[in-house]
Amino acid sequence: MTETDAIVALIALFEREGYARVEPPVLQPADVFIDLSGEDIRRRMFVTQDASGAELCLRPEYTIPVCLQHLAHRGAQPSGYAYGGPVFRMRPNESGEFLQAGLESIGRGDIAAADAEILGLALEGLGLIGAPTPTVKLGDMGLLHALIDGLGIAPAAKRRVIRTIVSGQDLASLSEADGPGNQEHAGLLAAIEGQAPQAAKAFVEDILSIAGIASVGGRSPGEIAERFLARAANRTVLSNDAWQVLERYLAIQGDPDQAAEAVRVLAKETGLDLNAAVGLFEERTGFMAARGLDVGAFSFAATFARNLDYYTGFIFEVQDPRRSDGKPVVGGGRYDRLLEHLGADSPIPAVGCSFWLDRIVGRP
């Protein structure tokens, strides 16, 4: 089977399940991907300009373009979409143009059922195009967010913690931001941490003005303010207790039932209210089992996080055990805030996945 044949077969399956085929334009506004995609995509984009000087990019993935198209035509109405075609990213020793297929479910309120449906269709689709028995990795950004919020971690520190986990680094790397320079100005850094950038910059410039400081080392007040903002953004501000709880959470792994039990034990012993997040996790597992999926064979790891910034809940990757590079053949998850960032009046629930066809079937 060729990649083109695989797209035809997958689209037919998804359309039978109620997902309408769409094909967003290849040229997309670059700023949207720069603001909302993960670093892995941002640094691999092919960027150009139109006649007016506006930056455009060749479509690096389908999720954002499908969401933009949905907002333009359907608003908040529930809809399902299937797609298949070329995407463009710079890849060492590989073609910058390759084929992807996938599906997106937008606007459904039955969160757990929609999550299970997407994973179920991903596995059914792999079987349809002749992929070998895969391994399934699960994660849950919703559990991580609930834990961090329960610990009362400040917004700036929360962003840094999540970036650290997504990039695969150990929490110990967070301490690198708390060197002598940051301790020296701890009071000012704490005052501006979490503020909107413009407000924080104005605050620092006012402090310098009150002190009668026009420049330091040749830097203007505005430049000095920018440096303080950068330091504030890198502050960890994790208490020892929060650190220990996060370390315990990140050590959790096992099948979904084992993971849920471990999180409930952690919540009980630390006094954190994680009932809503764990309840959704368990409900999703129940819907997976109801679809006939072998949830006992799935592997959950609290450290697992996909390298796109917009995921907010359930995430997964499907791997071909024959591949030695560990790269997924299918990846996806839930992104409930993405459409609001793209212009929706309020958050719209959404979940989807993409197939990396060049990793699954041979080219013609």
Image: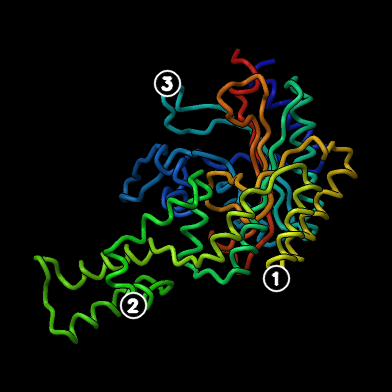
Give the residue displayed 44% in from the left and 28% down from the top. Answer: 91
Query: Residue 312 placed where, x, y %?
Result: 62, 56
Mark in front: 3 vs 2: 2
Q: In terms of image quadrants, where is residue 237?
A: bottom left
Give the residue displayed 68% in from the left and 27% down from the top. Answer: 7
Looking at this view, is 69 or 194 the one in front?
Answer: 194
The colour mode here is: rainbow
Q: Is residue 90 left or right of residue 338?
A: left
Instruction: Specify few, some or many for label 1: CA neighbours under 10 Å numbering under 14, 14-19, or 20 or more.
Output: few
Q: In terms of image quadrants, where is residue 292?
A: top right
Instruction: Specify few, some or many for label 2: CA neighbours under 10 Å numbering under 14, 14-19, or 20 or more.
Output: few
Query: Residue 327 placed where, x, y %?
Result: 58, 29
Instruction: Specify few, some or many for label 3: CA neighbours under 10 Å numbering under 14, 14-19, or 20 or more.
Output: few
Q: Where, quadrant-wise, is the N terminus in this rendering?
A: top right
Q: Which residue is mark 3?
A: 93
Q: CA distance from mark 3 to mark 2?
A: 49 Å
Q: Which residue is mark 1?
A: 271
Determine whether 130 is above or below 290 in the image.
above
Determine whether 54 is above or below 155 in the image.
above
SS at mark 3? loop
Q: Is residue 83 left or right of residue 64?
A: right
Q: Which residue is mark 2?
A: 187
Q: CA distance from mark 3 to mark 1?
A: 50 Å
Give the residue displayed 32% in from the left and 46% down from the top. Answer: 51
Three-letter residue code for mark 3: Asn
First in sequence: mark 3 vs mark 1: 3
